[in-house]
Image: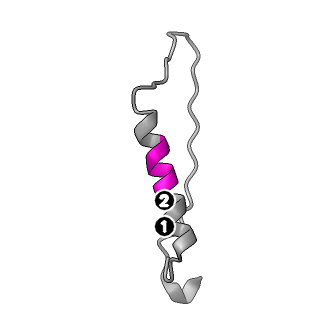
């Protein structure tokens, strides 16, 4: 971000407080066959500024 504002700092602090309060939580994965994982990527994100 080129010009972060006070509201952005407040949002980041809120996110960090949430993560700190839930760090003991986890995700349980059960063993099952046929699991398929799909991922997506924004491949143009790294393009030069002139192309944006």
**Figure quadrant of residue 32:** top right
Residue at figure coordinates x 50%, y 77% from the top left: 4
Q: Which mark is residue 9?
A: 1
What x and y, as percent, mark residue 20?
40, 40
**Residue 46 placement, left or right of 42:** left
Residue at figure coordinates x 55%, y 11% from the top left: 33
**Residue 26 placement, left or right of 41:** left
From the viewer's perspective, is residue 23 above or below residue 33? below
Q: CA distance from mark 2 to mark 1?
A: 5 Å
Residue at figure coordinates x 48%, y 59% from the top left: 12
What x and y, as percent, mark residue 51?
57, 84
From the viewer's perspective, is residue 44 above or below residue 22? below
- Element class at badge 1: helix
Mark 2 nearby-residue class (10 Å; few <14, some 14–19, many ≥20): few
Along the line of sight, which residue is nearer the eye, 3 or 27? 3
Secondary structure predominantly adopted by residues drawn in magenta: helix
Q: Is 14 in the magenta?
A: yes
What x and y, as percent, mark residue 43?
53, 63
Q: Is 21 in the magenta?
A: no
- Can you say which quadrant of the picture contains the C terminus? bottom right
From the viewer's perspective, is residue 12 above or below residue 26? below
Mark 1 nearby-residue class (10 Å; few <14, some 14–19, many ≥20): few
| Structure colour scheme | one colour
What x and y, as percent, mark residue 11?
54, 60
Give the magenta range.
Answer: 12-18
* Disc 2 to disc 1: CB gap under 8 Å: yes
From the viewer's perspective, is residue 11 above or below residue 4? above
Along the line of sight, which residue is nearer the eye, 24 or 27? 24
Residue at figure coordinates x 51%, y 85% from the top left: 49
Please give the residue where the numbered disc 2 appears in the rendered image: 12
Q: Is residue 37 visible?
A: yes
Along the line of sight, which residue is nearer the eye, 42 or 26? 26
């Amino acid at each position: 971000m080129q010009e972060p504002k006070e509201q952005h700092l407040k949002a980041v602090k809120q996110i960090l407080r949430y993560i700190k309060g839930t760090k003991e939580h986890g995700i349980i994965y059960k063993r099952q066959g046929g699991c398929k994982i799909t991922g997506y990527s924004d491949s143009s994100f790294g393009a030069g500024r002139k192309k944006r």
